[in-house]
Image: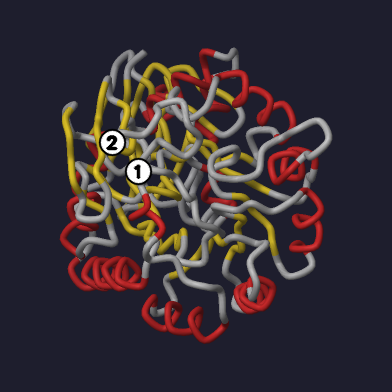
Amino acid sequence: MDTVLTAKRMLLPDREVENGAVLVKDGKIAAVGTAKDFSGADARTLDYGGCVLSPGFFDMHIHGCMGRVADESVDAVKTLAAFLPSTGATSFLATAMMKRGCQNAADAIAEQAEKGPSGATIRGIYMEGPFLSPRKLAGAEGADKDLVAPSVPALEEILAIGGGSVRVMGLGIELDGANDVMRELSRRGILVSAAHTNARYEDVGKAKAYGLKHATHLYNVMSGLHHRRPGVVGAVLTDDELTTELICDGVHLHPAAIDVALRCKGTDNVAMITDMTLGGLPDGDYDNGTVHIEVRDNIARFKGVDPDADHAIVGSTRPILAGIRTVTSLGYPLCEAVKMATLTPARIVGLDQEIGSIEVGKSADFAVFDD
């Protein structure tokens, strides 16, 4: 049966619609308007009153929840898919750092293709690794143990495991062998991202010639902005051809740093991500088999590491809505903040014809939330 969804506030990419409504037919958006436009329609009505009707959130970079990550098991990926709708996320890229995580994500995608999604739809794989620069963080040496030197043979093995589902790969662009890997990724149409990198400002410009187009969680685990050494951060902020991501949970970045990035890049070029690993867990001490982690005040860090040290945070514990609150608190309109969590990441990874906005023909994926 056809369905009409109505709400006091409906979010389009560039504006809010008061008393908005959307008609859904066969799982697709068939028409968009106001509640008055669909008055008397032969359809079931879902009225969300004074709430906000939004596109379903698309988290393009998320490892897991409750301490379970893609690198652990296929069941962990399925657990994440089941968890995400409670946070408003209806689609995600399963994010892995190792070959085993790629295999787990690929298996979960294959199962969804066969049986249909149980929870959020896995739209592909984000490989944040294994070609990363080591963090060399005292007390968390295990975090570097599975890193691999960049090479095309190693890449081909990962992509074969992914079975055509790898959409993004982040790597240390300054590492030996990285240029060949970036060239091959670009040739295959996979988004090339600078991730966990100690590259210099000049290295970013050179990497663009090999296919670099994106930067993984801007500011975090990369060379920062210094007034004589602009680093990767300076290069990304000043290059209009590069897109990026921000973890807007209020922990990873100071709000001013988020504001600087948005003033430089705009919401069309910055995807909001969670980079979540421990969402859904209470405060406590945890051991994932590789490193010891402590969660205090809803913040996850390597246990025993100076909390003020760079790279001490172990992924986020907070969902997309926490980031939307952060961005709107800076004065950005709600529709712009939500766009960062919907249409912008969809466009960055080439899925904007399917998801990311309330537009005719797109998948009928929605989030509903209150003020």
**Residue 102 shown left or right of residue 216 in the figure:** left
**Identity, as a three-letter code, of the amino acid under mark 1:** Gly
Q: Position of residue 174 (x, y in %)?
A: 67, 62
| Number of the label disc, if any, that sits on residue 244 | none
Residue beneath the point at 46% across and 40% down: 273
Identify residue for label 1. 139
Which quadrant of the figure has residue 98?
Answer: bottom left
Q: Measured along the vertical axis of the image, is residue 114 above or below residue 168?
A: below
Q: Position of residue 169 (x, y in %)?
A: 52, 64
Identify residue for label 2. 303
Q: Position of residue 47 (x, y in %)?
A: 27, 24
On the question of residue 218 being in view, the answer is yes
**Residue 219 shown left or right of residue 66 in the figure:** right
Q: Position of residue 235 (x, y in %)?
A: 76, 44
Q: Nearer the viewer, residue 117 or 195?
A: 195
Task: Kindly give the residue lying farthest to the front in the view shown.
Answer: 138
On the question of residue 358 being in view, the answer is no
Residues packed near mark 1 inside 10 Å, few (<14), some (14 to 19) or many (20 plus): some
Task: Kindly give the residue lying farthest to the bottom in the view shown.
Answer: 153
Residue beneath the point at 24% across and 43% down: 292
Residue beneath the point at 74% across and 31% down: 264
Q: Secondary structure at mark 1?
A: loop
Q: Secondary structure at mark 2?
A: loop
Which quadrant of the figure has residue 285?
Answer: top left
Q: Nearer the viewer, residue 280 or 371?
A: 280
Q: Measured along the vertical axis of the image, is residue 324 above or below residue 244?
A: above
Colour treatment of the image? secondary structure
Discs 2/1, front: 1
Q: Are marks 2 and 1 in contact (CB under 8 Å)?
A: yes
**Residue 282 shown left or right of residue 263 in the figure:** left
The count of marks equals 2
**Identity, as a three-letter code, of the amino acid under mark 2:** Lys
